[in-house]
Amino acid sequence: MPLIINRTPVTEDKWTLVSEEQSIPADGAIILPLAQWLENREALAGREVGVLVHGDDDLDQVLALNGKVELIAVAFPAFTDGRGFSIARLLRRAGYKGQLRALGDVTRDRLAYLERCGFDALQVPEDRYTPEVLNAFDEVSVRYQGGASVTRPAYPQS
């Protein structure tokens, strides 16, 4: 799947997504499901480890990842599931500085919103990616609400 990091397409990704059914590879940068990371975190100390979170994961456990992992991948299983937007906003508000990556149903019409919520890496499905998707970031120039990088809303506050 094509990966966009900071609005730039990336050809090589050092991270490997590991499913719950797979055994953990001995080396390399890995992304583990939250439950698998919680079970193995002591054994993984010193490794490059990211964590995959879902909308139904315990939010306290997700927020506790702040400062413990350098990448948090958030799953978007369907267009109708927007919990990942909230997870990203809450992580950024809590001070998370690592990479926030959106996976799953990541579509062109959501890219700018994903970025505004704090995502800096977006994994777009192969069948939905063309070089023109990068135009989506600049299509809306005025926003009424604040975002991860611009906290003030566009309207004057009293």
Image: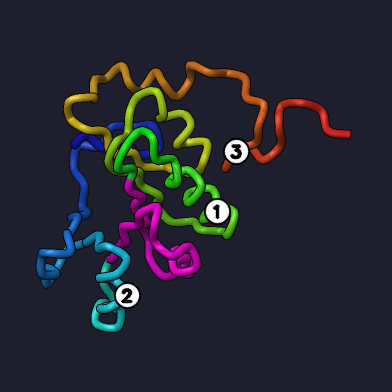
Q: Is label 2 or label 3 in front?
A: 2
- Badge 1: residue crowd in 10 Å (few <14, some 14–19, many ≥20): some
Residue receiving disc 3: 147
Q: Which residues are magenta?
A: 49-75
Q: Earlier in the sequence, mark 3 or mark 1?
A: 1
Instruction: Tell me the quarter of the image containing the C terminus.
Output: top right
- Badge 3: residue crowd in 10 Å (few <14, some 14–19, many ≥20): some
Residue at mark 3 to residue at mark 1: CA–CA distance? 11 Å
Q: Position of residue 28 (x, y in %)?
A: 17, 63
* Residue 3 included in the magenta stretch of the image: no
Residue receiving disc 1: 90
**Callout 2: helix, strand or loop?**
helix
Q: Are marks 2 and 3 in contact (CB under 8 Å)?
A: no
Q: Residue drawn at (38%, 61%), measured in percent from left and top?
A: 70
Q: How is the image coloured?
A: rainbow
Q: Is label 3 or label 1 in front?
A: 1
Instruction: Tell me the quarter of the image containing the N terminus.
Output: top left
* Residue 54 included in the magenta stretch of the image: yes
Type of amino acid under label 1:
Leu
Q: Residue drawn at (45%, 36%), measured in percent from left and top?
A: 114
In-front residue for pair 83/145: 83
**Callout 1: helix, strand or loop?**
helix
Specify the label residue 38 is tagged with: 2
Q: Is residue 42 above or below residue 79?
A: below
Q: Are marks 3 and 1 in contact (CB under 8 Å)?
A: no
Q: Position of residue 142 (x, y in %)?
A: 62, 20
Type of amino acid under label 3:
Gly
Type of amino acid under label 2:
Leu
